[in-house]
Image (spheres, rainbow, N blue to C red):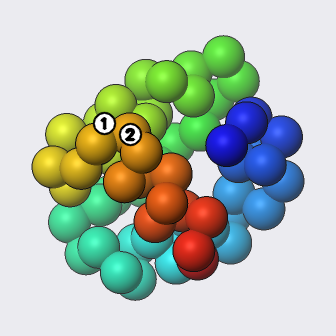
Amino acid sequence: MNTTELTGNWEEQKGKLKQKFAALTDNDLLFLKGKKEEMLGRIQTKLGKTKEELFKIISEL
C-alpha cells in the first residue's frame, strides 16, 4: 500500500477503522504529510498487529 492509496480515501477508511477497533482514537489515526510511518506505528502498537496485517485490514475496508 502506498501513500496515494492511503490518502485517497483516508477519511472514509479512518471512520471504518474506528468502528471496527474502538480502541483507536482520532490522534492514533492522525495522518500528517511525511508522517505515514509514525501513524502506522501508533496503530500497530495499539492493535498489536504487524505492518502486513494492518495493510490487509485497511485494504479490506
Answer whether residue 5 is visible to the viewer in this image.
yes
Q: Of helix, strand and loop, which one carries label 1? A: helix
Q: Quadrant of the N terminus?
A: top right
Residue 36 on image: x %, y %? 57, 28
Q: Are marks 1 and 2 in contact (CB under 8 Å)?
A: no
Q: Residue at x 69, y 57 (%)?
A: 10
In the figure, is residue 1 to the left or right of 16? right
- Quarter holding residue 12: bottom right
Residue furthest to the top: 34
Q: Residues within 10 Å of mark 1 (few under 14, many from 20)?
A: some
Task: List the residue tagged with mark 1.
Answer: 42
Kindly identify which numbered label has been placed on residue 51: 2
Residue at image position (61%, 64%) is 59
Left or right of 41 in this view: 11: right
Question: Eyeballing the image, is 58 above or below 16?
Answer: above
Three-letter amino acid code of the residue under disc 2? Lys
**Where's the C terminus, which quadrant?**
bottom right
Q: Nearer the viewer, mark 1 or mark 2?
A: 2
The answer to whether any part of residue 28 appears in the image is no
Give the residue type that dot 1 points to.
Arg
Q: Is residue 36 left or right of residue 57?
A: right
Q: Quadrant of residue 9?
A: bottom right
Rendered position, 37 above or below 60: above
Residue furthest to the bottom in view is 19
Residue at image point 83% right, 40% down: 4
